[in-house]
């Protein structure tokens, strides 16, 4: 029952976002649309931003279900961009009303496991310390999140496929090369 109520509150918020910005939506608006009382809302969430956090975390988890095993990081990144476009209203409202940091954390939750999976596959034949592998993952994660935040700031107007192609051109082959250089000790990372 708890998940059902949370999903109903999520659906109401997403519906209301089509009518007005997040900072103009009240808990009363959500509960009226959902057909529950305010105490029901507060049983599940402390405020609207807590609901937004929950939605973003749930969306990130759903996005990752069955999404492992992309052939390349660029396929996975393109998938992430399409997911953002599918949730464009929510993502843009959160970005504009709550702030960039929540969207940034959402992107980290999406990209980190994808890049870790890719790093594991890329260094299957080389020995790389976990700290060094995480350093490479973090570097690319921060680069991709930065590009995605800029794309979001610009209302997601550019074609995701074109954006991925441009980023891929910039870092073509460098992911594996970085892992290989770290494995030989030439760029050892201190803990």
Image (cartoon, rainbow, N blue to C red):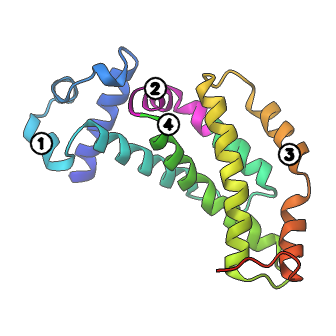
Dot 4 corresponds to which residue?
100
Q: Where's residue 113, x and y in %?
A: 61, 62
Q: Position of residue 187 (x, y in %)?
A: 84, 75
Q: Identify the mark nearer the N-term, 3 or 1.
A: 1
Q: Does 169 sit above or below residue 114?
A: above
| Residue identifier under label 3 | 168
Task: Assign the magenta stretch its main secondary structure.
Answer: helix
Direction from residue 27 to residue 39 in the image, left or right: left
Which element type, helix, strand or loop, lies under badge 2? helix
Q: First in sequence, mark 3 or 4: give its number.
A: 4
Q: Are marks 2 and 1 in contact (CB under 8 Å)?
A: no
Label 4 neighbour load within 10 Å: few <14, some 14-19, many 20+: some
Question: Which one is in front in this view, the residue at disc 3 or the one at disc 4?
Answer: 4
Which element is circle 3 on? helix
Q: Which residue is mark 1?
A: 40
Task: Determine whether, in the image, residue 67 is placed left or right of residue 65.
Answer: right
Q: Which residue is mark 2?
A: 96
Q: Position of residue 118 (x, y in %)?
A: 75, 65
Helix, strand or loop for disc 4 = helix
- Identity of the residue furthest to the top in this view: 19
Disc nearest the viewer among 3 and 1: 3
Region rendered in magenta: 83-98
Whole-Å distance between the Cαs marked 2 and 1? 27 Å
Q: Is residue 40 left or right of residue 157?
A: left
* Earlier-in-chain disc, 1 versus 4: 1
Compute the Cα span from label 1 to label 4.
Answer: 29 Å
The answer to whether mark 3 and mark 4 are in CB contact below 8 A is no
Q: Of 180 and 16, which appears nearest the observer?
A: 180
70 in relation to 147, above or below: below
């Amino acid at each position: 029952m708890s998940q059902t109520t949370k999903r109903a509150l999520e659906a109401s918020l997403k519906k209301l976002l089509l009518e007005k910005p997040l900072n103009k939506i009240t808990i009363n608006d959500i509960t009226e649309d959902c057909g529950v009382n305010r105490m029901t809302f507060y049983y599940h969430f402390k405020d609207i931003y807590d609901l937004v956090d929950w939605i973003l975390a749930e969306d990130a988890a759903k996005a990752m279900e069955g999404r492992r095993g992309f052939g390349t990081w660029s396929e996975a990144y393109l998938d992430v961009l399409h997911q953002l476009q599918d949730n464009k209203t929510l993502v843009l409202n959160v970005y504009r009303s709550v702030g960039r940091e929540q969207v940034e954390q959402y992107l980290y939750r999406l990209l980190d496991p994808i890049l870790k999976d890719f790093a594991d596959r890329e260094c299957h034949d080389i020995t790389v310390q976990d700290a060094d592998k995480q350093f490479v993952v973090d570097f690319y994660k921060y680069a991709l999140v930065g590009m995605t935040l800029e794309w979001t700031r610009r209302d997601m107007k550019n074609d995701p496929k074109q954006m991925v192609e441009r980023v891929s051109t910039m870092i073509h082959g460098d992911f594996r090369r970085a892992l290989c250089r770290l494995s030989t000790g030439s760029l050892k990372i201190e803990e």
